Amino acid sequence: MSLSSMRIAVLVFPGSNCDRDMMVAIERLTGRRPALVWHKESSLDPIDLAIVPGGFSFGDYLRCGALAARSPVIDAVLDHAARGGAVMGVCNGFQVLVETGLLPGVLMQNAGLKYVCRNVTLKVCETVDSPFTRNLSVDTPLTMPVAHNEGNYFATDDELARLEDNGQIAFRYTDGAAWGPANPNGAALDIAGIVSSNGRVMGMMPHPERAISAELGGSDGATLLRGCLEALAS
Amino acid sequence: MSNPEMTFENAASMGLSKDEWELILTRLGRTPNLCELGIFSAMWSEHCSYKSSKRWLKTMPVDGPQVIEGPGENAGAVDIGDGLAAIFKIESHNHPSYIEPYQGAATGVGGILRDVFTMGARPVALLNALRFGAADHEKTRHLLGGVVSGIGGYGNCIGIPTVGGEVNFDPSYNGNILVNAMAVGLANSDRIFRSAATGPGNPVIYVGAKTGRDGIHGATMASAEFSDETESKRPTVQVGDPFTGKLLMEACLELMASDSVLSIQDMGAAGLTSSSVEMASKGGLGMEIDLDLVPAREDGMSAYELMLSESQERMLMVLKPDATDTAREIFNKWDLDFMPIGRVTETGRLVLLKDGGTACDIPLAPLVDDAPEYDRPTVEFTPHPTLESAAITNEAPISDILGRLMQTIDLASRRWIYEQYDSQVMADTIQGPGGDAGLIRVHGSNRGLAMTTDCTPRYVEADPRIGGAQAVAEAYRNICAVGARPLAITNNLNFGNPEKPDIMTQLAQSVIGMGEAARALDTPVVSGNVSLYNETDGRAIRPCPVVGMVGVIDDIAAAVGVAPKKSGQTLMVIGQNDSCNDGWLGASLYARHLADEPLAAPPPVDLDAERRHGEFLQAQINKGHIAAAHDIGDGGLAVAVAEMCIAGGMGAVLSCPEGGNRHGWAFGEDQGRYLVAVDDPDAVARAANDMNVDITIIGVLNGDDELKFGSGDAISVTQMKHDAEATIPALMQG
């Protein structure tokens, strides 16, 4: 299928604030505007990819993503994932996917106890077969911003060992040109993004949708998203 | 008795003078009750009435072909082309932020965002201007940490990027920090909403969060000096809820797109009081409100409390009579309260009903038209003498001095601060914090909006008229330095107690200076805010009239930043000629850090030259002749070069002048200058000659790690970067 015939849904919670950014990025890459789906919807039309965007879904005064994970639309996303459908969560979307149980682990407050917005460099890892990494080169680091207060990935030692053994670590923070430590939040094993054991669900803290053109400071985010979309379309 | 009759003692405790009390009695023809007196005191507070500053504010230019809406509405609006308007304003939250830094700063951001989206604009950027006490003062860490976290806490959650700002430290702010927040939004020029109520009988709707007992009488607190008892005023600080703010913003913008709203006003300072009074009085009408219908967070709130609460995230609007159902549906979707609480009347009176009785029935005209206006006494300002460079300079290598200055809190990197702000959400940020101006793309176009905040309080203190003009000129340079055309300004006048003639002189003179500069640079004032009584135990802050400026660039692809792209490029100074071998050190950072700040005149501002140099630079940038540009400001030429080298990760060799005063040349803060990196210096020099602009080549960029001043006087760029980056993190670690 061509990229423009892909059916993509971007979920919208009342406090989502990267929904438009993701929509613009996807439209730029596919030529087709994705559907914005309100959190109160209890069903999804057939789709090829569900995206949970960044933001503060329900204010995140409670645990980030905890309320969003219990909203009506998430039941539809769980059904979609159970059928092997692809799901991607970015930043708050990653937090939501962890809260739904689609991805393991938790995202704790940053080790520095502060919100952090800056560029990071990502190493693409060898993973279980996954549309989210298949078209990306492990030799080409990708630079894009993070912007979060709770991106400190944590899991038990057993769980972390299982993620490594299964090839579920998709992206790790690595040294790059940006000022400051490579790992911006203290995440275990420098984890920036992971995939589910079947490779069909991916969550990441960095924002590829913010790095889609040179004037925005770089286009590595477009490289990442295009790679995912092309793998899903093929 | 929840609404008793008042006495002068009650009025005095609310900050009203004897004369003001007598005026209320005369206008009402009777004694006001608690609720009524509360309304008068809030509306006549310095914060709402501008009673000390109005006389001077009127002298500033507010018109121009670009102006769509000048001062008087929730925010100002300027035409940026393509049928779009930039809507912006700056506002202070100084007193609350000192008492409770996180919430004070957060609600400052929330409040200014409401001002902008009330006008029908989607906010697209935030900036701020912050002043803290001395770096080593016991409260500075706590206040800096809390304020930065609060600004981020609100802006990051609601999803508006913070793209610029300025932060400075000075002992005069030890007991009275400044937190000024600016918001910029975009709207269609023909879809701007205003606050004047229309149509007697039309429903008055309350939307947003519920009203609680927070922030009661905050506007009055903000109009008084601080003392040791300030801690006890904590209950007057509002609590922010950025998530509800986001819901309110989305619901209001959705409703405004549906053609249902006749007028709208946010409940900011003085809450329901100022919103209802301003809407009704601007429309030349009256308003009746049933306070029992106001959504309240707690039971048993009195009329006084409901009217004076400054609970956040609330709006008052007048709807078209048949639009109530559409509007209710939208607010239900966003899970917000939506409550018709009254109606527009023809009476010219504000009538408030409560518990089956009348809690307030007062004419609106005196509240607004009879608000006191004072021509407070000023004194003759005696200028300080001009400082000769030789009086404070020595023969130390320039690199030694530069290395020291770059580590000072004044010049240290602000990264620790701005990395706590989401500067990229909305995915239109072309240049975020750290450059001369923030630059965002107008969504879906090639057009860019540049924006900045600026003020140099030490100049304002040294000569308020020059300092006022300089704040405008520096903001102008920041906008020009990215290649944009400055359009208009908003200002935030932060001063001490205006009842003291020397403080009033600072206010008056700096407003005159700002007005002169705004006129000369064609950047009229379209909105603003005044914050007075910034004193603690009788000691005033250094005067800080902050300028927020917005400009436009037609093609963001032409914009430049501070970072040069390749070595071999020539460094030139626009606004300086080849014979320059000294500089203006009076009131400079050099004088502050190396000579104990002797009283001296600040650098003069030549407004004709500013305009000529700024327009020249804009033209050269848009022709593609400039690779990088940087305003020469604090710390002078040497600091500007160091910052450019750090930004580009490059070295440079500068040729120093013969004779004169080397430190004056390197660190003088003469105005109207820009540092630029160019590929073809001859082309730029020819164009400068044609436009009668002084220009001089000062050196060349290279791929080394050293910044060299002639031969033998060098400093490592990497070392400077590390030192500049380390200062604030070290301060915060304690």
Image: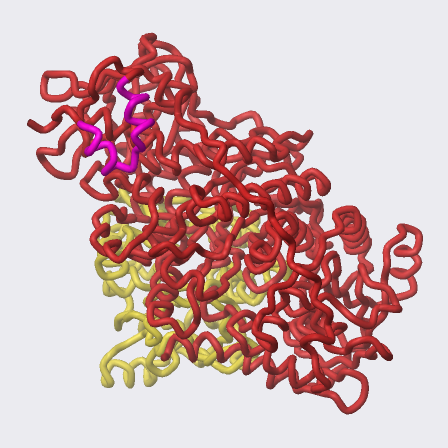
Measured as percent of width and height from the top left, residue B567 is found at: 77, 77
Which one is nearer the viewer's eye here, B315 or B698?
Answer: B698
Q: Which chain is red?
A: B
Residue A60 vertical position relative to residue B64 in the rendered view, above or below: below
Measured as percent of width and height from the top left, residue B311 is found at: 26, 40
Which quadrant of the view contains residue B79? top right
Which quadrant is the C terminus of chain B positioned in? Answer: bottom left
Which quadrant of the view contains residue A40? top left
Measured as percent of width and height from the top left, residue B97 is found at: 34, 54
| Residue at x 85%, y 62% (from the top left corner) | B695
Question: Would residue B443 appear left or right of B65 to someone viewing this image?
Answer: left
Which one is nearer the viewer's eye here, B380 or B130?
Answer: B380
Measured as percent of width and height from the top left, residue B418 is found at: 47, 64
Q: Is residue A204 visible?
A: yes
B19 in the magenta segment? yes
User: Which colour denotes chain A?
Assistant: yellow
| Residue at x 80%, y 61% (from the top left corner) | B574
Which one is nearer the viewer's eye here, B518 or A22?
Answer: B518
Q: In the rendered structure, which segment of residues is drawn in magenta?
A: B7-25
Which one is nearer the viewer's eye here, B2 or A229?
Answer: B2
A91 in the magenta segment? no
